[in-house]
Structures are given as C-alpha cells and as structure tokens.
Image (tube, rainbow, N blue to C red):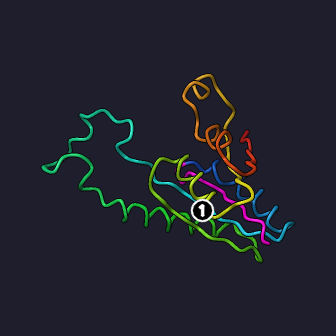
Amino acid sequence: MTFKILVPVDLAEESSYQQPLAVAFEQAQKLGGEVTVLTVVPDIMAGLDWRYAIRGEKGGAGDLDMKAIVRVAEQRLEQIVAAAVPPGITIDTIARHGVIYEVILELAAELQVDQIIMAAHRPTLGRFLLGEITARVVRHAKCSVNVVRNG
C-alpha cells in the first residue's frame, strides 16, 4: 500500500508551497509514497458585496470562464512543482474551484490520503477570530495533518 500525501498550496503565496513541498518530498522518499499537490481557485463571489457582483450587461460572475481560470491555475501549479520535484517521486497536480478548505477535505477523502501537509503563518488574533483554512482542515480532516510553520 502506497503512502499518500496531499499538499494544498496557494499559488499567490510562495510561502504556502516552498517548505510544505520540501517536507512532502522528503517524506515521500523515506516512505516510498506519492504526492498530490492541490491548488484551489476560490469562489470569486464568496464574501463580496453585491455592488461588486454587478459587472457588464450580464451582471454577476456569469462572464467569467471558471474552467479556463482553473486550467491556468493548473498550468502554473505544474510549473512550480516541476521546478521543485526531486527525481524518483511520483507526483500528481490537481486544480479545482470552490471553497478552499472544503475542496481540500473532499479531495483528501476521495484520494484516501494518509497525510495532508500544508503551510501556516504565525497566528495572529485576527486569524484566530476569522478561522483560517489551515485550522479548519486540522479540525475536520480524517487523516493526519502536518502543519509547516513559516518564519
């Protein structure tokens, strides 16, 4: 049975993938595992004021081609991973769209991963009150979660 590792990353935040990918690749080499790297294109309209939703004649987000946005995200993810992956590691990249922590948890269950490795910044009061993505994943994941702190 192969040890499966999921690494969710934010393409806009380099600190979200540098250390977690290094940790994941190291563990995959030691355990003979495979790594899946995930990026999630967030719901664009989530949390926005209604005034921002009205765009053009169609209004709302209907004129956004979410499939194209996800394809671009996956291409960028593939570039990042290709530059970092050591030889001999089985790797897969996935880009999806939705509520970030929900997509992470759904994919972890779908792939039956053994561990999620993700980044977290030093906590601040605002992050505790807002409920950051990492905290939600840690609370709800059915597998181990390795939180890699940055700086």
Range shown magenta:
1-12
Q: To which quarter of the image does residue 114 belong?
A: bottom right
* Left or right placement of residue 22 versus residue 49 in this view: right
Query: Residue lying farthest top?
Result: 125
Query: Residue lying farthest right?
Result: 30
Q: To which quarter of the image does residue 36 belong?
A: bottom right
Query: Where's the C terminus, which quadrant?
Result: top right
Query: Residue lying farthest bottom?
Result: 88
| Amino acid identity at mark 1 | Glu
Q: Which residue is drawn at 71% across and 74% down?
A: 90
Point out residue 25 in the picture as x, y percentages from the top left corner: 76, 64
Q: Residue at x 66, y 57 (%)?
A: 7
* Left or right placement of residue 111 versus residue 23 in this view: left
Query: Where's the N terminus, which quadrant?
Result: bottom right
Q: Name the residue under label 1.
A: 110
Nearest to the observer: residue 134 or residue 106: 106
How dense is the environment of label 1, judged by Cα within 10 Å: few (below 14), some, or many (20 and up)? few
* Left or right placement of residue 134 versus residue 146 in this view: left
Q: Is residue 149 above or below residue 63?
A: above
